[in-house]
Image (cartoon, grey):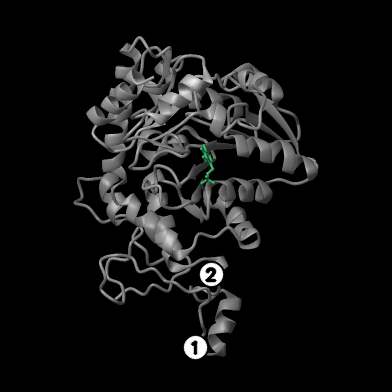
Amino acid sequence: MLSLYSATGRNVRKAPRMARKHKKAGLSTRAVHSGEIRYNEYGSVTTPIVQSSTFIFRNIDEIKQLAKGTNDRFEYGRYGHPTQVAAERKLAALEEAEDAVLFSSGMSAITTSFFALLKTGDHIIITDDAYKRTLDFCKGSLGRFGIETSVVKMCDYNAIKKAIKPNTRIFFSESPTNPYLNIMDLERLMRIFRKTDIIVISDSTFATPYNQRPLEYGIHIVIHSATKYLAGHNDILSGVVLGKKKLTSPIREYLKITGGVIDPNSAYLLIRGLKTFDLRMKRLNENGQIVAEHLEKDPRIIKVYYPGLPSHPHHDVAVRQMNGFGGVVTFEVKHNIKYALKFLSKLKILSIGPSLGGVESLVTHPATVSYYRNTRRERLQLGITDGLIRLAVGVEDADDIIADIDQALDAC
Ligand SMILES: Cc1ncc(COP(=O)(O)O)c(C=O)c1O
């Protein structure tokens, strides 16, 4: 009988053993079984939620063994807990990463990674359409600690190359990006960085390990806001950092200081959400493509941005590098805030709200939801037009999503 008491995950399943002719279990099998303890102390088929902030010692010898590093057990919730370990192992199996470190949110994963890997005097490069809060953190918070940030245009490979300095420590970008779904050519990117000792980080939230595997291209660290597709039910916040242990270990140690540990209930909901990861991603990719193609044919829509459409500027790279194009479809209705908000208010199935990758379709108007603090001129400089709508399709029937959009446009 396997114990739940393993802080390193030594007794946690990597992937179920398969017949010899199969090299490794498929993505859906890994999503269901990896990270779980098959026969735990209670015989429960699900991984228990170990709801405890601390872990007690039977005797003083156990404390001494822990101090010497000769036993593999938990000590205190902020340093890790069994439900977290199971979720981390499952995520590592999906991304095919050596290690995964789980956090209470995507932003906690990003900020803790930067704090762990950077020191005063370092320089980082980040692309201009990265998540707004990540950009804010780099330009604002890191600057206060004497860390310089260069913001370069997404997919401008010459600008990226030119931005490298002797003290550059990190290059950070996303792919696909929000809201225009720009795609970084990972092979081309790594031709720039392969011979440097700069750590290349990719926020792969919009891609997921179903659609894209940055580690296979030599990217050093992959980050996800697991709040989105990975957890997939719009019910928890979480984030994950994946890569080789040599890079994730200092980040795991820093998490013990910054304290953004995931709580046991959220770790369980993440595990539960991940069991249907493969099924949900298939559906979301399908829905995204169907809805994007439909919108592109509608004369009331000015423009559609979706990497699965030949009209997307990075369609060729996306086809080469991705297995699917995800559930986010961005489009422009009339260049008029009033019209865009009226359209949103007429929707009956799609809900107005930020976030993406969940089972419920969500729709936002970036100009009023994410960029409301910016002036119109600033928004336009950032490419956020008045009629821009970001739709994150859910797993509803594509016909119903389309019918809802159509009736809302008819009512405008
Ligand atoms: C690409 C990307 N990275 C990171 C984050 C932050 O994740 P979280 O909301 O889980 O902190 C978000 C949130 O929207 C995101 O879209």
Kindly state the secondary structure of the residue where label 2 is placed.
helix
For badge 1, the amino acid type reads: Arg
Question: Residue 214 vs residue 69: left or right?
Answer: left
Q: Position of residue 16 (x, y in %)?
A: 27, 56
Question: Residue 134 vs residue 301: left or right?
Answer: right
Q: Residue at x 27, y 35 (%)?
A: 283
Residue 9 can be seen in this image: no
Dots 1, 2 in contact, CB < 8 A? no
Residue 140 can be seen in this image: yes
Q: Position of residue 388 (x, y in %)?
A: 49, 21
In which image quadrant can residue 332 be found?
top left
Q: Mark 1 — residue? A: 58
For badge 2, the amino acid type reads: Gly
* Quarter of the image where the N terminus is located: bottom left
Question: Residue 357 vs residue 219: left or right?
Answer: left
* Quarter of the image where the C terminus is located: top left
Kindly state the secondary structure of the residue where label 1 is placed.
loop
Q: Judge whether 281 appears above or below 390 on screen.
A: below
User: Tag 2 or tag 1, which sits nearer the N-term?
Assistant: 1
Q: Mark 2 — residue? A: 77
Mark 2 is surrounded, within 10 Å at the Cα level, by few (under 14), some (14 to 19) or many (20 or more) other residues, namely many
Q: Residue at x 55, y 88 (%)?
A: 61
* 63, 381: nearer the viewer: 381
